[in-house]
Image (cartoon, rainbow, N blue to C red):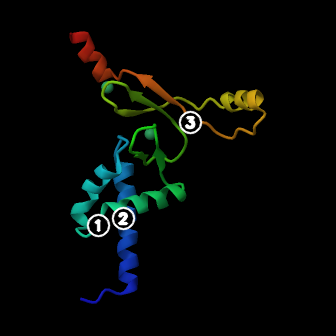
């Protein structure tokens, strides 16, 4: 079978579109491995490297966020606008914290540093509801 350039381009576009759909459809903040496992059945020749390349591209296009919480692997977020997160220190799950952005923080940090602070990321740590229940039962 002869595969033309345009077919290749088309397949790549469909793969990237599918990755974005999978990310937008989940409330979780999945790893590249998880996204790979979801998309792979549709694209048998897909490699993990391609997933990473597409995630990088989507990030550069402002379609997704890459969340690097200092762990060895990144998590990805289909919500690209800035929002706060919570990480459970017990189970490691990442949740959205749907409270308004505190834009005073940018001003305060600008005042403190003399830098032109444009934006900030905020992560809360503690125990999630599920882990709290487990603790109460003991
Ligand atoms: Zn938890
Ligand atoms: Mn999020």
Q: Point out the tag, 2 or 3, that comes first from the N-terminus.
A: 2
Tell me whether the residue at label 2 lies in contact with that at label 1, contact meaning CB atoms closer than 8 angstroms: yes
- Mark 2 or 3: in front is 2
Q: In this image, 23 relative to 115: left or right?
A: left
> How far across and down, in percent of the image, does residue 57 sit?
48, 61
Q: Which residue is mark 3?
A: 121
Q: Is mark 2 within 8 Å of ligand 2?
A: no
For residue 132, above or below residue 68: above
Residue 49, by quadrant, is: bottom left
Tell me the tag on residue 46.
1
The quarter of the picture where the C terminus appears is top left
Q: Residue at x 39, y 42 (%)?
A: 72
Of helix, strand and loop, which one carries label 1?
Answer: loop
Label 1 Cα neighbours within 10 Å, binned few <14 / some 14-19 / many ≥20: some
Quadrant of the displayed image that contains ligand 2: top left
Q: Which of disc 3 and disc 1 is earlier in sequence?
A: 1
- Residue of label 2: 50
| Distance Cα–Cα, label 1 vs label 3 | 33 Å
**Distance between the Cα atoms at labels 2 and 3?**
28 Å
């Amino acid at each position: 079978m002869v595969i033309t350039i345009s077919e290749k381009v088309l397949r790549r576009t469909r793969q990237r579109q599918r990755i974005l759909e999978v990310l937008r459809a989940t409330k979780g903040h999945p790893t590249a491995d998880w996204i790979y496992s979801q998309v792979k059945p549709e694209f048998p020749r897909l490699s993990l490297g391609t997933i990473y390349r597409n995630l990088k591209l989507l990030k550069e296009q402002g379609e997704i966020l890459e969340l690097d919480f200092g762990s060895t692997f990144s998590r990805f977020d289909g919500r690209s606008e800035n929002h706060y997160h919570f990480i459970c220190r017990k189970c490691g799950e990442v949740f959205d914290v749907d409270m308004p952005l505190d834009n005073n923080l940018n001003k305060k940090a600008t005042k403190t540093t003399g830098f032109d602070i444009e934006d900030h990321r905020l992560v809360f740590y503690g125990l999630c509801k599920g882990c709290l229940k487990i603790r109460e039962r003991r």
